[in-house]
Amino acid sequence: MLRNLIRIGLTNVFFILPLCAAEKAPAKILFIGNSYTGNNQLPNLFKEVVASGGHAAPVIKSSNPGGKTLEQHLGVKSTQTLIEEGGWDVVIIQGQSQEAAMAQQYENMRKSFMDGGKALCEMIHRKSPQARIVWYQTWARHPDYWKAKTPDLAVGKLPEEMMARNRASYDALAKSVPKSMVARVGEAWAMYYKAHPGKELHTGDNSHPTFAGSYLAALVIYQSIYQPATMKMAYRGNLTEELAAELQKTAAANGKR
C-alpha cells in the first residue's frame, strides 16, 4: 500500500512524500540540474524506466547546463523558461556535484545552497503550486579521486565523509521546503559499491556517471516518486541482464531503508 513515509535521521525527522494511492501519476516532469543530469540523457533514461514499470510515460523536459549550482540556475534562461511554462507535477532538482559537500564546510556555500534551492522552489510553486519537489541527491567522488596529488579536500577527506555531507545538505533542503523529498541516489551508489567491489559507476574522471550509474539514478528517482511494488523491469539499455538486476535490487533495497 502506498502511503507517506517518515525517514528518521540521526537528529531530525524528515518527511518523505511519494505518490499516495489516490493520487494520479505525474503527467509532466521537469529536471533541473547539470552534467549529472545531462550525461547519458538521464531524463530520457528515466522515461524508459517509468514506461518499463508499467506507467504512462510523462512529458519530460530538462535544463541541465554543465556545472551550474542551485543559485546559478536562478539566472539560467532555459531554467527560467521551463519553470515559467508551469503545470509541472514533479520537479527533480540536482545541485552541482561539490556544493552539497562544501555547504557543510563553508557558511557562504551553505547559504548559496539553501537559499538557491529554496528560491528555485518558490519560483516553481508560483507557476506550479501543486508540484512535488524531488531533490536528486548526488554521490561522492570515486576513491581514486583522493589518490591524486592535490585532491580538493573541501569536499571531505574520504568518499564516506563527502557522502555524509551530501546527505546532510539535501536532507536540510527537504526539511525546509514544502512538498519536498530526497531521491537518495548517492546513498544507493554507496550501497552498490559496498556490495559489489570492483564494479564501476563512475567514469574515468572519478566524478561523472557511467551508463550504469545513470541507470541506478533513474531507478532511485523512479522508486522515490512512484513507490512501485517491484523494481524488476525489462528495460536495461545497453547493460547486461545481470548488471541491470544488481542495480534494480540495489534501488529496491535503498528505498526500504
Image (spheres, helix red, strand yellow):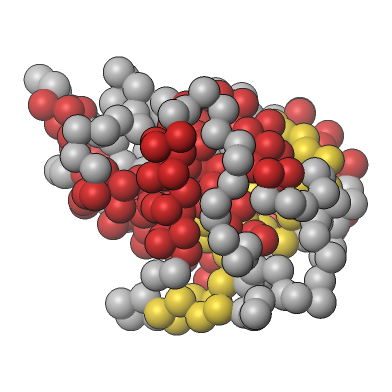
Q: Give 138 or 199, whichever is nearer the viewer.
A: 199
Please indicate whether residue 221 sits to the left or right of residue 244 in the image.
right
Q: Is residue 143 visible?
A: yes
Picture quarter containing residue 199? top left
Picture quarter containing residue 60? top right
Where's residue 138, x and y in %?
43, 44
Please name the residue shown 74% across and 51% down the image: 54
Q: Is residue 62 above or below residue 216?
A: above
Quadrant of the frame with the N terminus: bottom right
Please name the residue shown 20% across and 28% down the image: 145
Please indicate whether residue 48 sits to the left or right of residue 138 in the image.
right
Where's residue 70, x and y in %?
57, 43
Q: Is residue 171 above or below residue 188?
A: below
Quadrant of the frame with the C terminus: bottom left
Please indicate whether residue 238 sits to the left or right of residue 124 in the image.
left
Where's residue 39, x and y in %?
54, 24
Q: Is residue 79 visible?
A: no
Please name the residue shown 51% across and 37% down the image: 215
Q: Give 250 or 68, whichever is nearer the viewer.
A: 250
